[in-house]
Image (tube, rainbow, N blue to C red):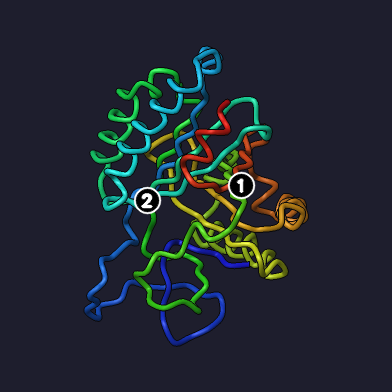
Amino acid sequence: MTVSNFQKEQGESGLRLVQDSEAPNERPQVEKQFVNFLFLRVSPEWRKLDGGTKRAYKQEFERVFDEFRSEFLLFTYSLVGFDSKADLMFWRVGRSLDLIQEMTAKLYRTELGSYLQTADSYLSSTKAMMFVDSTGDGKFHVQAGAAKYHFVYPCTKQSDWFDMPAEERDAMVKEYFMVGMRFPNIKIHLTHAFGFNDHEYLVSFETDEPKDFLALAEELRETPAGKLNVRGMPVYTCRQRPLMECLDALG
């Protein structure tokens, strides 16, 4: 398992806490970037269009989407066949909330965009101290989107969580993630959502093997921190694919 806050530090190994570094670094700092999971569903009217019209609309949508690749880390996922609430998920990581809004508005103004509705949109931010896998090639270098499957879990805590001292909460979070050390092929991303919405964290899991995620999820549920999660929150199963493959899967 890898636990990531989109931060890597060179030359050491193991799971640990990473503090801000005062050393200069030529790479842009990413620890305070914004993270957005945008879930979309397509109107049934889309499937009634003829093939040529759909092809043209998808190409227009792709051109607008690609305009923002220099501004974000962009990853595209299909949920077709996995979920009844959404068909697409866009995972966007960048420095500007305004650009997240601008990109979304431009996509909605395309012809295909008129057939899309927002099923969910989760906004969060990274912070400077998190659990990370420090075997990468630089603290400020983002490592994400490498696995086939992405499981997204908005995490809301019960009221008892907020009555605990901060030190106790930190210890429980650490124990929560240390469970995942037995799953070396799973990367966990933890970003902070409190203030943007009702969720305390956004937790997501990247892996090539869904069965391993299910086993990890069962173990995490039994940890002290896991038992304080509010039940009934949505968990999205997403399959990473190129944008056009995601659009083709819409029918």
Residue 93: assigned label: 2
> In this figure, what is the number of numbered marks?
2
Q: Secondary structure at mark 2?
A: strand
Residue 60: which numbered mark, if any? none
Q: Is residue 120 left or right of residue 237?
A: left
Whole-percent x and y of residue 185? 66, 66
Image quarter where the C terminus lies is top right
Viewer-side residue, 121 vs 14: 121
Residue holding disc 1 = 151
Left or right of 175 on screen, residue 61: left
Question: Helix or strand or loop: what does disc 1 sit on?
Answer: strand
Above or below — where is 134 with respect to 125? below
Q: Give residue 83's position: percent from left, percent from top.
A: 65, 31
Residue lying furthest bottom in this view? 11
Q: Which amino acid, mark 1?
A: Phe
- The quarter of the picture where the N terminus appears is bottom right
Amino acid on which disc 2 is placed: Val
Q: Name the residue rendered at 37%, 37% in the picture.
A: 62
Q: Residue at x 72, y 69 (%)?
A: 182
Residue 198, percent from left and from top? 47, 34
Quarter assignment of residue 6: bottom left
Q: Is residue 155 left or right of residue 197?
A: right
232 vs 163, nearest the viewer = 232
Of the image marks 1 and 2, the number of the one nearer the N terminus: 2
Q: Residues within 10 Å of mark 2 (few under 14, many from 20)?
A: many
| As drawn, 251 above or below 38 | above
What distance separates the C-alpha of mark 1 from that of mark 2? Answer: 16 Å
Residue 74 place in picture, x, y as percent: 40, 49
Q: Is residue 44 above or below residue 88?
A: above
Residue at image position (51%, 46%) is: 202
